[in-house]
Every structure is written in C-alpha cells, then in structure tokens.
Image (cartoon, helix red, strand yellow):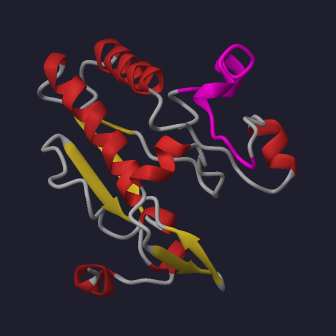
Amino acid sequence: FDAMMPPENYFSEHPEYFSLIDGKRGGPYILHQKGVHYQLCTTNPEVVQLCVEYLRKRFDENPSLECESISPNDGFGWCECERCQALDSGATVAKYGWTHRCVSDRIFTFVNQIARELRKTHPDKTITVYVYSDHVLPPKSVGKIESNVIPMIATAASTGLNARRLVTCS
C-alpha cells in the first residue's frame, strides 16, 4: 500500500485514509512506534479511487508494464472502522502463536473494486496481490476474484501453512 498512498503525502490532510486503531487514526509513524504497521482503510471510497488513479498513471507512464502489485503492507495494523470490520467473515488465522482476525474478505473486496475500475481504461493490464498472513484464507463473501487479478500465494515463510493446506481450507 505504501507506493499507492504514501503517508507523507496523505496523512496530515486525510488521516481517514489510514487504519483506525484503538479509536484513533494514529498515523503510520505513531503506529510503528507501537510495533504495529499501518494499513489503509480499504472501505473508504476515496482510497479506492486514489489507488485506481495511481495504477492508471503507472500503466500510462510505463506502457510495457503488464502488472502491478497492490498488496497490503507487511505486519498488522488493520483498520478497525465499522465498515472494514463488517466485511470480515469472522474466520481467524493462527500465526506465531497468536490468533488473528482473517481480513481476506476486506482485502479482496478492495482489490476487486480496483480491478473493475482499472479494467474500464486498461483492459489488458493485471494487478497482483499477495495472499498470506491475515489474508491467507480464501474470502467467504467475495465470490469470484476479478479476471485481471492474480493472487500470489506466499506460503510457509509467513504463515506456517503450505499450498496443500490452502487448497483444503473452507
């Protein structure tokens, strides 16, 4: 998310673009001090539009570029606003001895929104998104992943799961 919406360009005027954590949009620098990385508020319509604009510009300025990643930042720091949490399925992911909320549904809702908009102007371009950590499980409410999205599974290194286990998850 860093490349699409650098906090140094957006946070001071638009903290609502970033994760709400513990009731505050604390900003990435404050959150890093707490040991938590930041994410975007993926249900904010302006965030979706800004990410689409970023991708369109990237593809326009680099015509030979076939795909671009829109993967979340490493770490946690998921937005706790009502809209974002409402998309979560209730599933959990066990990682490093802790159990975390699975955010696959919110991530793939966000990715699909961007993919649909991007296809209108750049039908031959593709976006990629890593599938790992707290968004390693298949989303339950998203339905079909858009055809111009390539999920890239990052297995055992970050999740303790392997590809065979992912295929059998429900």
Q: Nearer the viewer, residue 111 or 3?
A: 111
User: Which residue lies at the image location 50% right of the left edge and 28% below the top edge?
Assistant: 4
Residue 9 at x, y percent in the picture: 66, 17
Count of marks, rendered view: 0
Q: Which secondary structure dominates the residues rendered in magenta?
A: loop
Residue 73 covered by magenta stretch: no
User: Which residue lies at the image location 38% right of the left edge and 16% below the top edge?
Assistant: 53
Residue 17 covered by magenta stretch: yes
Q: Nearer the viewer, residue 11 or 62?
A: 11
Q: Nearer the viewer, residue 108 or 2?
A: 108
Magenta residues? Answer: 5-22
Residue 59 at x, y percent in the picture: 30, 20
Residue 138 falls in which quadrant of the image? bottom left
Q: In this view, does 57 lie to the left or right of 8?
A: left
User: Which residue lies at the image location 58% right of the left edge and 43% below the top edge?
Assistant: 81
Q: Is residue 135 above or below residue 55?
A: below
User: Which residue lies at the image location 46% right of the left edge and 80% below the top edge?
Assistant: 156
